């Protein structure tokens, strides 16, 4: 069963959903937590569009939303294609968008998906099971230099070079096929004193490989810009991120789109002609203490909200 504890549920939907007769998009449907709350606030002529790459998420959300009174469209696509999805459904714009980034509780807890360093499973990590690139491909075919770059850039792991070299050396004795094998290689690459403190030694590397497999950061800025273009004037977008790399992209994208001029500060006169497309950009909204107590995985979550000009 697809189970996911929805993070920042009320804060997100309260900020985004303003019109019970409006059209709303959940760019990362998951198990339908945010979508269920949105749909519960919509009238019969309101509309919810849910997008997800994961077939299991779509199936679970479809069951969860089947009793809702509003119109519902669920689509298996990459969220970067939000414009195409909305247009193909016959809409010219939407009133609000929510996006909950990262991996779901279901994906982490379903061992055979290979997302978690806590379970021994095949090296997979694909959000969309139709795609060819898997964690096994990354681990077994990338060069030491390529692996180190992925682990350093996407995992912010200071031992990236050591981990990458260990992985390549381990491949000489046979390909790595399971998460358990990868965890052992990572542990061996990290000094014992470091392993005894802080988070699980494999946490950053697994995050990095997952991001690489699913193109999460590569697509994020484009997806955000595409989403904002889909909004009607006055429509709102709320995006939840779970690590600094995601939040940095969202923060900077929102900031740039809320400025009339993006010329370098040394230019005395604006030459870019840029006009703001966002306003009322919120500061970081974080989970309450009660939510953190109920769901420890929410600890790193940050919500940012903005309104279309």
Image: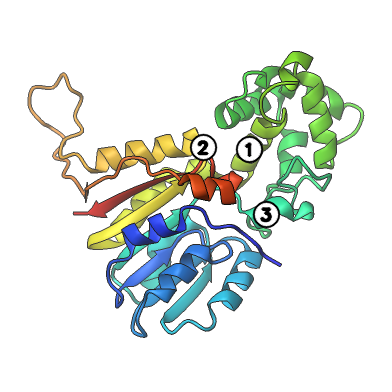
Question: Picture coordinates of residue 13 (x, y %)?
Answer: 38, 61
The residue shown at (29%, 68%) is 93
Numbered mark located on residue 289 in the image: none
Q: For numbered disc 2, what is the local secondary structure?
A: loop
**Outermost residue toward the right?**
173
Question: Picture coordinates of residue 20 (x, y %)?
Answer: 31, 75
Residue 53 seen in the figure: yes
Question: Picture coordinates of residue 73 (x, y %)?
Answer: 47, 76
Quarter holding residue 226: bottom left
Q: Looking at the image, which is closer to me, 272 or 193?
A: 193
Cα distance in 3D space between marks 3 and 1 = 13 Å
Cα distance in 3D space between marks 2 and 1 = 10 Å
Question: Picture coordinates of residue 26 (x, y %)?
Answer: 45, 63
Say few, some or many: other residues with alpha carbon within 10 Å of mark 1 (under 14 / 14 to 19 / 20 or more): many
Dots 2, 3 in contact, CB < 8 A = no
Whether 172 is drawn above or below 7: the answer is above
Say few, some or many: other residues with alpha carbon within 10 Å of mark 2 (under 14 / 14 to 19 / 20 or more): some
Q: Earlier in the sequence, mark 2 or mark 1?
A: 1
Whether 118 is drawn above or below 267: the answer is below
Q: For numbered disc 1, what is the local secondary structure?
A: helix
Q: For numbered disc 3, what is the local secondary structure?
A: helix
Give the residue at mark 1: 207
Say few, some or many: other residues with alpha carbon within 10 Å of mark 3 (under 14 / 14 to 19 / 20 or more): many
The residue shown at (19%, 29%) is 263
Looking at the figure, which quarter contains the C terminus? bottom left
The residue shown at (18%, 45%) is 276
Give the residue at mark 2: 243
Dots 2, 1 in contact, CB < 8 A = yes
Q: Looking at the image, which is closer to me, 10 or 85?
A: 10
The residue shown at (33%, 65%) is 17
Cα distance in 3D space between marks 2 and 3 = 17 Å
Give the residue at mark 3: 107
């Amino acid at each position: 069963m697809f189970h996911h504890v929805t993070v920042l549920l009320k804060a997100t939907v309260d900020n985004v959903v303003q019109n019970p007769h409006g059209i709303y998009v959940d760019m990362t449907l998951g198990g339908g937590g945010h979508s269920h709350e949105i749909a519960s606030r919509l009238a019969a002529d309101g509309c919810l569009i849910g997008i997800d790459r994961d077939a299991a998420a779509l199936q679970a959300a479809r069951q969860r939303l089947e009793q809702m009174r509003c119109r519902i469209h669920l689509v298996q696509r990459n969220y970067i294609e939000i414009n195409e999805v909305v247009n193909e459904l016959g809409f010219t714009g939407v009133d609000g968008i929510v996006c909950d980034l990262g991996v779901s509780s279901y994906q982490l807890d379903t061992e055979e998906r290979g997302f978690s360093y806590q379970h021994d499973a095949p090296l997979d990590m694909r959000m969309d099971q139709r795609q060819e690139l898997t964690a096994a491909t990354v681990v077994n075919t990338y060069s030491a230099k390529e692996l180190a770059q992925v682990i350093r850039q996407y995992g912010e792991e200071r031992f990236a070079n050591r981990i990458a070299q260990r992985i390549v050396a381990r491949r000489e004795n046979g390909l790595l096929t399971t998460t358990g094998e990868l965890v052992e290689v990572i542990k061996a690459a990290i000094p014992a004193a470091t392993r005894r403190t802080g988070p699980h030694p494999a946490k950053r590397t697994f995050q990095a490989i997952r991001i690489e497999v699913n193109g999460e950061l590569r697509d994020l800025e484009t997806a955000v810009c595409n989403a904002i273009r889909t909004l009607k004037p006055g429509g709102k977008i709320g995006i939840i991120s779970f690590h600094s790399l995601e939040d940095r992209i969202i923060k900077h994208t929102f900031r740039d789109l809320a400025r009339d001029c993006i010329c370098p500060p040394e230019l005395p006169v604006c030459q870019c002609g840029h006009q703001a497309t966002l306003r009322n950009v919120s500061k970081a909204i974080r989970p309450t203490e009660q939510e953190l107590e109920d769901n420890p995985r929410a600890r790193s979550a940050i919500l940012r909200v903005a309104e279309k000009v």
